[in-house]
Structures are given as structure tokens and as C-alpha cells.
Image (cartoon, helix red, strand yellow):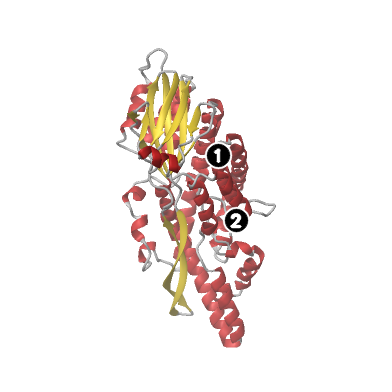
Amino acid sequence: MVSRALTLATLVAAVQLTGCSVFRSYDSEMQETNQQLAAGNVDAALAVLESNNKGEHKDLLYYFEKGELLRSKGDLQGSQDAWRSADGVVLQWEDSVKLDTAKYLSQFGSYLVNDKVRRYEGYDYEKVMLSTQMALNLLAQNDFDGARTEIKKTHEREALIAELRDKQYLKREEEAEQEGIKTEYKDLQGYPVASLDAPDVVNLKNSYQSAFSHYLAGFVYEALGEKGLAAPGYRKAAELRPNTPLLDQALLNLDKNSARPGESDVLVVVQSGLAPARDSISIPLPLPIDNELVIVPLSFPIMRDDTLAAPVGQVRLDDKALALTALNSTSAMSRRALRDDMPGIILRTSVRGITRGVAQKNLNKTNPMAGLLVGLASAVVEGADTRTWRTLPDQTLVARLRLAPGEHQLSVASALGGTQVKVKIDRPYQVVSLRVLGNQVFAGGPAVQVIAPPAPAQAVAALK
């Protein structure tokens, strides 16, 4: 352990090389962006995003956020272009994992560099939801063939992630035993354990498979006449979210044609809210330093729910209430991701804390000023990684129904009275996708038109 203290210079060098990434508060940046988005000022939200990302080389998060903002604006092509850039970064990650999994795991398990100064590779659920959101963009333009390509990519991505995480968890257990680190997140005094042990988190099979993604896959395959592929999609969705009538019914209806002549099979998708933020909490932890237990303050990530947007209100179609079924919760997925990652985070954070403690203790003996500088440098880099895709919708709700071709009207209730959306149904299978943020409703594609609500003064006059 003492020999590791000699490599502390690597940590200091990392601070110098990564510079602003150490001091960057991603959550603070995105708060202003999301405030503008929730107020309906999408152009202003985009301007804030650009002002916080002035460098020539953009990171994965920039493309994640830009794609969702442009989608909200109705610029589906621009959104898809941004997400293709993000997808390119994820594909590079996939190639590095396939080329040499052991090397990738070795780099990921490095103890010397704080997580927040590493290159952001995206959480597993973000990688999977990226291809799902790209499929929704294409379906809004009635491009089912293009959506099929994205869905196939989703399946392949899930398989790679599953194989990688199995190897990573095994390696982490071996390293924890070697280092003598047995602390679990439940042992951290003051940590909000209940948020990670909530039923909706624990009941998830993993952090990256979404019932909505697989149900959407089934719908696309069914629309393309590939029932043999649609059935596994519906079956997996039902497995991920059991006892859900909508999912069970999809399998039952697959082998029978219940549509009347001239009807369209329509899937209404309502995505609401914003993904939760990651925050950092400092917790004093007893660490073995030179055969002594020393209390060291260490930082760990926690999840904080978004409070900008209220849950989606009632949705009506042609003056009839629409029964929506929740098929995805980004909040639950992100908490499950953190729950699964916490053993590794605790291991890396603890070993760094021990390394810093040994180095500072030795320096204090020979050069107190140098020891003080090391302590200050450690305080600068200490802090949990708070980066995460913040504009990603939180809840995804769906309804499936048969509609006659022609124009229909959706209405989404809100505190200001609601928003009207005109929908044109003109295809045998069709997806209508809405993005709801409090009083704001966003949509894109040739079949959907959001009718601007009256100004507040007009609304008050109408109430009078």
C-alpha cells in the first residue's frame, strides 16, 4: 500500500491535465438549460448548452442533451444528427470493449484518478435509451425500416453490456478482497440508502433493459409483418414489467387480426419529466492507514429527483380519457445503475483515500509544506462524479388503440388549462409521440401539430 503512495503524482498530474473538468459542475450547468426548456424556451436552452460547451471537441453529454433539445423543438433531423454523433462515441466504446475486454476493465478499475475526471462514456441505460429515442424520431416520420435498424442495435448493445458487467462484477469482487475493502453502501452513515433500496429499483432486472424499448420493438416488427420477431419483443417487455395488461394483451392479439377494415393501429407515447440529477455527498469513513484507523471524509454520488416539472396530467383523445400505462422510469433505472455501481465506487474511493492518507502522512514527516499542498490538491479533486444525461425524459407512458383514418385531437391537461394537439392518422400502423414538461407539450413529425395555448391574460379573461 505504501508503494502506491509514490504514484500520487499521477493524481496531481491528472488534475493539471484535466483542468476545468475537475471544477465543472455539470448539474449547475444543466439546471439553467432545463429551466429554459420547462418554460418552453427551447432556443434559449440550446444557447445555454452551447455557452457551456465552447470547446472544439464536444463530449458525449453535449450530443445527448442537444439531441433531446432539438427533438423538443421539432427539429427531428437536427436531433438525429446530434444523436448520431453520440452514437458514434458509444460505438467506439463498444469497439474498445470487444477488442480487449480485459484491458478495458483494467483501465476502468484504475484507483488513482477520480471518476469525475475520466472520459464520460455514458451509463448503460443511457446507451440503450439513446437508440430507443432515435427510433422514436424515425417513427415520428413514419420510417419503420429505419426504426428497425435502431431497435436491432438496441438488442446488440444490451447483449454486450450484459456480458461486460458480468466480468466487471467478478473482477471487482476479487479486487475488493485483495484490498481488504468490505464496506457496502448500507454501511455509509448518512447515505440515503432507502433511495437505492426502493421497490421500483430493486424489482428491476438490471439498469439498462427497458420494457418500453422492447414493447416498441414488438410494435415495429409487427407493423413490418415480422410477427416472429415481434413476439420476443412483447415477451421480454412482459418479463421486465410483469402483471401489465397492455403487455400481456399484445402477445394475445399478435396471432389474431382484431382490426376492422379501415382502422389504424396507433401507439401513443407520452414522455414526461426530466431524468434525476446526480449530486455529491461527503461521508466520513474509517480507513486503515499505516495500521491505524483514520477517519477520512470521502465523497459518494447520490440521486436527486427533478422538481421542475409536475407529473403529466390527464390525456384525452377526442374528448375521451386515454388510459396510459407506464413502461419506463429513468429515475428507477438510474438509481439501479448507481446501486449496482456503488461497490466499485466505494472500492475506488477508499483506495484513493488510503493512498492520499499514506502520502500525506509520509510527507508531513519530511516536508510539512509539501504535505499541506498534497492535502489541498486532494481536497480539490475530491467529489463524486455528477455527470448524467439530464434532458432525458423520466417517465414513458403508452396507450394503444384502433383509430379511424383522419384528424383526431389530443388534449394534455396542465395547471394552465391544457394543450391541444392535432393528429393526422393515415397509415395502418402509426406512432404518435409527445414530450410533456409541466405546462409545455412538444411534438414533431408531419402527423402531429401542437396548437399554441392562449396567452395567460387571455386564459384569465376566459375564466372570468
Horizontal and vertical percent position of residue 452 = 48, 35
- Using the rendered view, name the quadrant where residue 173 is placed: bottom left
Q: Is residue 323 left or right of residue 163?
A: left
Q: Which residue sits at x=58%, y=74%?
A: 377
- Between 450 and 371, the one lying in front of the other is 450
Q: Is residue 464 above or below residue 15?
A: above
Horizontal and vertical percent position of residue 342 = 43, 59
Q: Split into 4 quadrants, where in the image is the C terminus?
A: top left
Residue picked out by circle 2: 119
The kind of residue on which mark 2 rests is: Arg
Q: Mark 1 falls on what kind of element?
A: helix
Q: Which mark is residue 90?
A: none
The kind of residue on which mark 1 rests is: Lys
- Tag in front: 2 or 1: 1
Horizontal and vertical percent position of residue 62 = 59, 49
Residue picked out by circle 1: 73
Q: Is residue 311 above or below residue 231?
A: below
Q: Is residue 203 left or right of residue 439?
A: left
Q: Mark 2 falls on what kind of element?
A: loop
